[in-house]
């Protein structure tokens, strides 16, 4: 293969495969941002295939009812290709962090468009939210599973099953907020988003501070699950291995934690926290 050609200004226009293979992802990215040469774009995108696959596996609970992992990987690659063009390295955000948020957001948007959550699950989720809010107001603390089951008129086992099934509804609404918290508000917001005015930025920061307080109110094992799942991006199976308990137990802890966090945030929104 012949050596790569250069422009009149000395800027490289073509690269041999050996040259591309020898470049780091950062070097590829810098060269692409500097030149806009499409010849560099897909080699750069392919460097992050592993990241896309990892994210697809992490959020498989969101799309498992309507799509396969390969479908989501393909969707992620398209999102990644767009993120390469839109990413601004001057904002001080790592590209991996930026693109992870983009891909997770794309999957969540896809799930919302599919309206994949059955009506029966949505109804039970609303019933659980209402009962939880009522008991929290009455008791001044988080209700136990037994108290929740009694209020709902079902067995404790049925309540735990309904809670696990409905928890993904809550995950979709809390997921972006978790990511903003982990990135200290550094992720890019759409034009006209919450950071478009100083007062909106302050409100967002207050919301993130409240979420932090909500997380610290959880039991230690619940905090651990939330941290490993949302911050370390481990799967439920991997968290089970780390904590040396069963995967169903991790799912139960996650469901309870999400319900408590949603209750705490709802109390905050209505002036009760």
Image: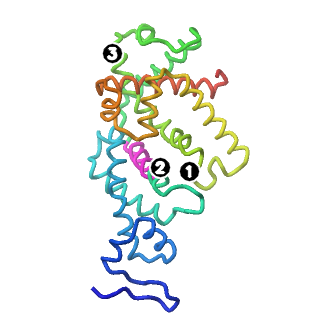
Q: Which mark is residue 187?
A: 1
The one nearer the camera, 12 or 264, is 12
Mark 1 and 2 residues: CB-CB less than 8 Å, in contact? yes
Q: Which mark is residue 158?
A: 3
Measured Cα–Cα span from mark 2 to mark 3: 34 Å
Number of residues whose C-alpha sits closer than 10 Å to that of mark 1, classed few (under 14), some (14–19) or many (20 or more): many
- When the figure is inspected, residue 94 is found, relative to residue 112, above or below; the finding is below
- When the figure is inspected, residue 158 is found, relative to residue 116, above or below; the finding is above
**Residue with the mark numbered 2:** 101
| N-terminal label among 2 and 3 | 2
Measured Cα–Cα span from mark 1 to mark 2: 8 Å
Question: Which stretch appears magenta?
Answer: 102-114
Number of residues whose C-alpha sits closer than 10 Å to that of mark 2, classed few (under 14), some (14–19) or many (20 or more): some
The residue lying furthest to the front in this view is 22
The one nearer the camera, 204 or 127, is 204
The kind of secondary structure element at disc 2 is helix
Residue 247 is left or right of residue 255, and the answer is left
Q: Residue at x 55, y 63 (%)?
A: 88
Measured Cα–Cα span from mark 1 to mark 3: 39 Å
Q: Quadrant of the C terminus?
A: top right
Residue 173 falls within the magenta-colored stretch: no
Q: Residue at x 44, y 51 (%)?
A: 100
Mark 1 and 3 residues: CB-CB less than 8 Å, in contact? no
Residue 256 screen position, x and y as percent: 43, 22
- When the figure is inspected, residue 100 is found, relative to residue 31, above or below; the finding is above
């Amino acid at each position: 293969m012949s050596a790569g050609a250069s422009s009149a200004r000395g800027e490289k226009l073509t690269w041999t495969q050996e040259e591309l293979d020898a470049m780091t992802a950062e070097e590829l990215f810098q060269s692409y941002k500097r030149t806009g040469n499409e010849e560099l774009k897909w080699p750069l995108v392919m460097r992050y295939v592993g990241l896309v696959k990892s994210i697809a596996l992490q959020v498989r609970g969101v799309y498992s009812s309507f799509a396969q992992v390969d479908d989501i990987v393909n969707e992620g690659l398209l999102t990644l290709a767009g993120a390469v063009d839109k990413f601004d390295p001057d904002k001080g955000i790592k590209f991996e962090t930026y693109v992870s948020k983009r891909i997770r957001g794309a999957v969540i948007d896809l799930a919302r468009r599919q309206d994949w959550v059955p009506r029966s699950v949505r109804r039970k989720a609303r019933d659980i939210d209402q009962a939880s809010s009522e008991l929290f107001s009455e008791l001044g603390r988080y209700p136990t599973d037994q108290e929740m089951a009694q209020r709902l008129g079902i067995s404790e086992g049925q309540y735990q099953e309904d809670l696990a099934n409905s928890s993904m509804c809550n995950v979709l609404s809390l997921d972006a907020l978790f990511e903003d918290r982990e990135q200290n508000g550094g992720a890019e917001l759409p034009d006209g988003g919450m950071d478009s005015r100083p007062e909106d930025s302050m409100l967002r920061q207050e919301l993130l501070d409240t979420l932090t307080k909500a997380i610290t109110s959880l039991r230690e094992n619940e905090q651990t699950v939330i941290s490993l799942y949302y911050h370390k991006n481990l799967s439920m199976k991997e968290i089970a291995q780390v904590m040396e308990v069963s995967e169903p137990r991790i799912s139960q802890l996650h469901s309870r934690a999400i319900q408590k966090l949603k209750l705490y945030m709802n109390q905050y929104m209505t002036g009760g926290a």
